[in-house]
Image (tube, rainbow, N blue to C red):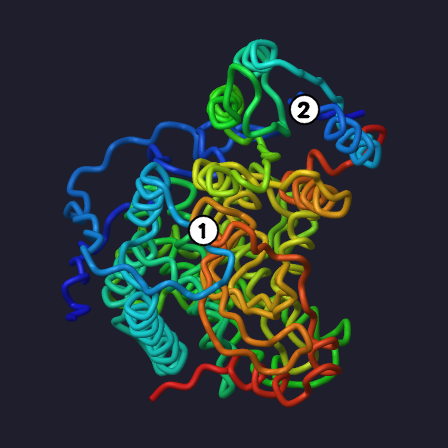
Amino acid sequence: MADPKQLLFIEEEGYVIDRVREILKGFPQFEITSANSGEEARELATNRAFDVVITDMYIRGVSGLELLHHAKEKNKEVVVIIITGADNVDVAAGALKEGAFDFVIKPPSLDRLANILKLVTLVNPAIGRKPSA
Amino acid sequence: MKFSDLNGRAKKEEAPEPRVREKKTAYFRASAEPAAGPPNPLDAPLPDIPGKLPPVPEAAPAAAPEAPPAGIPEKRSISRKDRQRKDEAAVRASARPFPELDAQAREIYSRNIALAKELIGQIDRGYVEKYGSIMRQAELNSQALSSNPVLLSYTRYATADDYLYAHSANVAVISQAMGLALGLERSAVNFLGFCALAHDLGMIDHSKLAKQENRLTDAEYSEIMLHPEAGAARIDRFLDMDGRLKEQAKKIILQVHERIDAGGYPGRLTNEEISFSAQIIGIADVYEAMSHPRSWRPAGHPHNVMKHLIDKEGHGFNSRVVKALIEVFSIYPPGSLVALSTGEIAGVVQVNPGSLTRPVVSVLLDPDFSPALPRLADLLEHPLTGIERIVEEEELLARNPKFAARQELERWWVDW
């Protein structure tokens, strides 16, 4: 009955994309839109409202922080999860203070991202309910 | 420091109807539009009331030195940009170090407990002249809650002589924090504090039932269901309270146990019929009750209580109050015992405003549950350390019974 929740996934590295997609299979309540370039990501984040955004901290042509701000403008309650390399943890930590929900370090562990997504569904019950319920 | 400096003189007899005010930083939107369902009376513009509270000076974050680093190993060097962000976050929460915030919070909380004791102890002796002092305390709470996130953490305490003292004080502080999070006007937040402190005055009639160790029978439960009316009736005993305000307070207190799915009592009202203030106090009341021990059951883990209440959204509580509760407490409320990603066991001591998953914690036990070197860690400042899972009482009891006993003792408020 409920509309599927909109999730934007922005990543350009193939192995990360594969792994995150695998994790997302466990969350059928999300309708996933992907972007793998900065241009495309900015376009999507500025024009469409998403419930959840999973983004790399650095995509060619755009930063995760900028995308976070765009996404927040479209939907103040958007949950943004940052994926970052281990050497950029400080920047990701800064994103937490800008309102990101949490971050994961590459390569994202299945458990960690799944746990974060479970918390997301907890704080946003509308996301947690099964689409057909 | 003089706490009386904080003590703004709340003008009595201000009309307290909640009004939404523009809000600065929040995880959740406090917009005027209802999240779902019928329009909320709160959203309608209310007439401006002359003679408001005097403007309250923002508690200036003192230029105090920063707290010493907590010594978590993975802390990285901080770039200039990050330093700036850190400063902003510090100003947002408070630039004062934790011990100073904690000392202030303890003092303010202690006054709330004392006031609750006085009120509950005196209300049946005839008439009381306490509205003024309760509203002054509520103003103090509002000021402290806006500048000192540690005050909220004190609501984890319980009182052993009578649960009702801490329960009333806690529900008042939590309701006020929610009112502020929702962007309500200060006068409305303070009145919410008054109503919350007085919301269970009707339970005085049932103190025996509240102390028994068995679960309530149906007959006893029906008896308890009379307490909202008895509580509302006691509002008439306030000598220093305007008649119009009494009526408002009585209406709110009567509705605290109503639920939007009409599953509450005494009136089985539905969403539109229940005042917004009563809904705020209602969810604060349930959170407080479930996360504190009662004679017939142990306390629930605060994280599990939050989960339960979030799950109830749309059934018992409207989504705006559920979101306000999440915003105030995050999903690991103060008093939560958690396991960190380092394996250590820690207690949540302060919510980081704006962050739902990264509070300030006090590290208590090593990964093997043996005592650790106690230290504070702000998980926003230690990005590589996160909360992995909650630790429930049974696990603690099994792994370190001595520590579990100490934790159990520490939840009881001791007034010196």
Nearer the observer, B416 or B384: B384
User: Which chain is home to disc 2?
Assistant: A
Task: Say which residue appears at 30% left-offset and 73% top-offset.
Answer: B103
Q: Are marks 1 and 2 on the same chain?
A: no
Task: Establish if A82 lies above or below B211.
Answer: above
Find residue B371 and report its image quarter: bottom right
Task: Say which residue appears at 15% left-offset and 70% top-offset.
Answer: B2
Find residue A30 and report its image quarter: top right
Q: Which residue is mark 2?
A: A9
Instruction: Check disc 2: other Cα within 10 Å, few if <14, some if 14-19, many if 20+.
Output: many
Nearer the observer, B397 or B48: B397
Spot occupied by residue B101 in the image (x, y as percentages of width and height): 31, 65
Mark 1 secondary-structure assignment: loop
Question: Which numbered marker is on residue B87?
Answer: none
Mark 1 or 2: the one toward you: 1
Is residue A27 visible in the rendered image? The answer is yes
Amino acid, disc 2: Phe
Task: Say which residue appears at 67% left-offset and 85% top-offset.
Answer: B212
Amino acid, disc 1: Arg
Structural distance between the alpha carbons of marks 1 and 2: 28 Å
Spot occupied by residue B260 in the image (x, y as percentages of width and height): 63, 44
